[in-house]
Image (cartoon, rainbow, N blue to C red):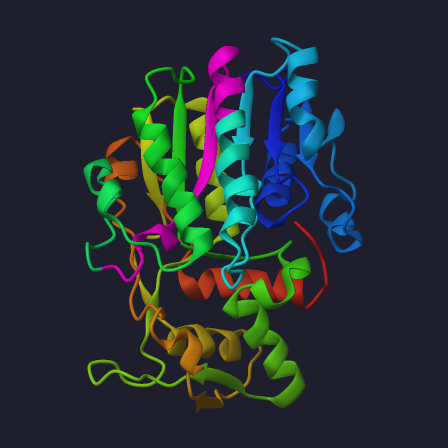
Amino acid sequence: MGKHEVIAITGAAGFIGSALVGYLNQLGYEQLVLVDDFSSQKKVYNLLGKQYLTKVHRDQFGEWIQQHPNSIQYLFHLGARTDTTQQDYELFKRMNLEYSKNIWNYCTEQQIPMVYASSAATYGNGHLGFTDDESLIQQLQPLNPYAHSKNEFDKWVLEQKNQPPHWYGLKFFNVFGPNEYHKERMASVVYHAYKQVLRNGSIQLFQSHRDDYADGEQQRDFIYVKDVVAVCEWLLNNTPKNGIYNLGTGQCRSFKDLATAIFKSLHLPPVIQFIETPKEIRSSYQYHTEADMQKLRAAGYTHAFYSLEQAVDDYIQHYLEQASYY
């Protein structure tokens, strides 16, 4: 993909979107069309100093793309309503499902390759495992309206006869890293735990309410945002088989490991307190997630992912401690 070709990014002011803008800028891509609702003052810093062609409000993007036919050569659809505690499905249906269908249709009509953000939340409690086998997608049982909207779009995509020339849905696992500061309570555990250490000198983790897991041994596939954007850029310049792919590290780690890595990066002895998991989320709380990464690896992505310790240390030392952005 030439550096002069135009790339559109939805959700460009958000966490992963702005990190992708920063990464593409580093590689010399500056012909970027940024799509988002740019009204949030907290997100302004995510785009400071970034190079791009123009900004388009997300509500005007459909009109803009019709008025500028053949002007975009690639599209990353990373914009979504992501609040997993919001229970209003109509909101998710409009923002995540219907909006995403429109983006897909533009890309199909104008033959624009696209990457879109799905989510590991679609796997629900993981009773079918965490393999990105598309034949299982109809059977998945997401646990909240956000995850349901993401899975409904995946299902819809797989039914489409008319498609963009190349398309990839990425099931992001637990992404963390710079530029998530505006997300407040929806920011990553790493971000919140770091803040807890500064405030109290300790980190609070949920107790286990299952006999087969010790406190703090609940597991997640934590992936650094720098790895996520590297995969996005790889897809820009490679054309593996169209489809839905997991994007985690393939290596689950415990919350205790995570807390320990934070203390180590700050040169402090670990002080961890265990608190009860709130009753209202216990039934939907996941004890284990781990991406099966064979599909992306088989498609040709060979780069190593950051280890949890490397990623936490990079995030803390170069971003959180310096209040800087990627």
Could you tell me residue 80's position as x and y percent? Answer: 56, 44
Closest to the observer, 307 or 293: 293
Q: In this view, does 107 lie to the left or right of 137?
A: right
Q: Where, by quadrant of the figure, is residue 277 drawn?
A: bottom left
Q: Residue 222, relative to residue 1: is it above or below?
A: below
Could you tell me residue 274's position as x and y percent? Answer: 43, 89
Identified at 41% across, 82% down, the residue is 279
Identified at 25% across, 82% down, the residue is 210
| Residue range highlighted in magenta | 103-126
Closest to the observer, 306 or 134: 134
Could you tell me residue 275's position as x and y percent? Answer: 45, 89
Residue 109 part of the magenta-drawn span: yes
Q: In this view, does 162 lie to the left or right of 316?
A: left
Identified at 69% across, 20% down, the residue is 63
Could you tell me residue 191's position as x and y percent? Answer: 58, 68
Q: Where, by quadrant of the figure, is residue 51 drawn?
A: top right
Residue 212 part of the magenta-drawn span: no
Q: In this view, does 310 lie to the left or right of 152?
A: right
Q: Residue 79, relative to residue 82: is it above or below?
A: above
Closest to the observer, 95 or 271: 95
The answer to whether one can see residue 301 in this image is: no
The answer to whether one can see residue 120 in this image is: yes
Identified at 30% across, 53% down, the residue is 123
How many labels sit on residues? 0
Q: Residue 134, relative to residue 72: is it above or below?
A: below
Residue sticking out furthest to the top: 70
